[in-house]
Image (spheres, grey):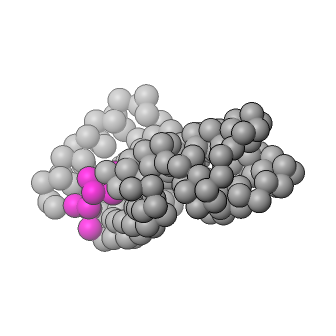
Amino acid sequence: MIKYLPLIEKVLLIQVLLTSILLVGFDMLSVWFILSALWLSTFYMLGTFLLVFTIYGKKINDGFEIIILLVSQILLSFSVVAILFKVMSWPGSAFYLLVSAIGLLFISILITLKQVPYFSILLKRIMFFGLLTGILFWIPASKWIHFRYHKHPKYADVYTKYLENPRDSVAKANWENELENYHNNK
């Protein structure tokens, strides 16, 4: 099982990427995308240590290296969840993306300074997800919502207004009404 971890990771990554790309055109894939992202997040939370161990066949004895590895696992998992929040246009995504991007930047600096050769595989993942979270952070929520719901511009407008001021009862009522229309017209 352990020798298949790199293959499992690739399958999960491809699955998340394909469902996120297709999600823009087919809203019915939302549940599949959520499950895919959560599976990948769980894999990174539980499997990063085994992945490094499998690829390099080394035991990590240094306490600092174990801490770096554990924090990396948490940050990679957190960044996948942050990406999930952004792609699904859920509130709070900007905060999660910012925290994960800063955390991944910080941990990548530590890994680079430590220069542990078998952390290069981890550094590649950190750089990929760090860049992705950074890019998604800089895309405004309104532009992302209009991009994601390009087939439903009225819903995108109402949802954007609701997210700008979630305490506004009129905006919330308009969004709930339009959400019902959106689900009924699928």
Q: Is residue 35 visible?
A: yes
- Can you give x and y, in whole percent of width and height, for residue 112 in the image? 82, 55
The answer to whether one can see residue 84 in this image is no
Instruction: Write the residue at 39% across / 66% down.
Output: 11
Near-viewer residue (37 or 136): 37
Number of marks in the rendered image:
0
Q: Which residues are magenta?
A: 26-34
28 drawn magenta: yes
User: The N terminus appears in which quarter of the rendering?
Assistant: bottom left
Q: Residue at x 74, y 46 (%)?
A: 107
Taking the image as shown, residue 153 lies to the left or right of residue 110, namely left
Task: Check the image and name the residue furthest to the right.
Answer: 113
- As drawn, the residue found furthest toward the left would be 184
Residue 28 picture quarter: bottom left
Q: Residue at x 59, y 52 (%)?
A: 53
Q: Is residue 32 above or below residue 81?
A: below
**Residue 186 image offset from top left, x and y in percent:** 16, 61
Q: Position of residue 9 (x, y in %)?
A: 45, 61
As rendered, which of 131 and 142 lies closer to the eye?
A: 131
Is the magenta region chiefly helix, strand or loop?
A: helix
Q: Is residue 67 magenta?
A: no
Q: Residue 49, position in %: x, y?
A: 57, 46
The residue shown at (72%, 39%) is 61
Q: Nearer the viewer, residue 31 or 51?
A: 51
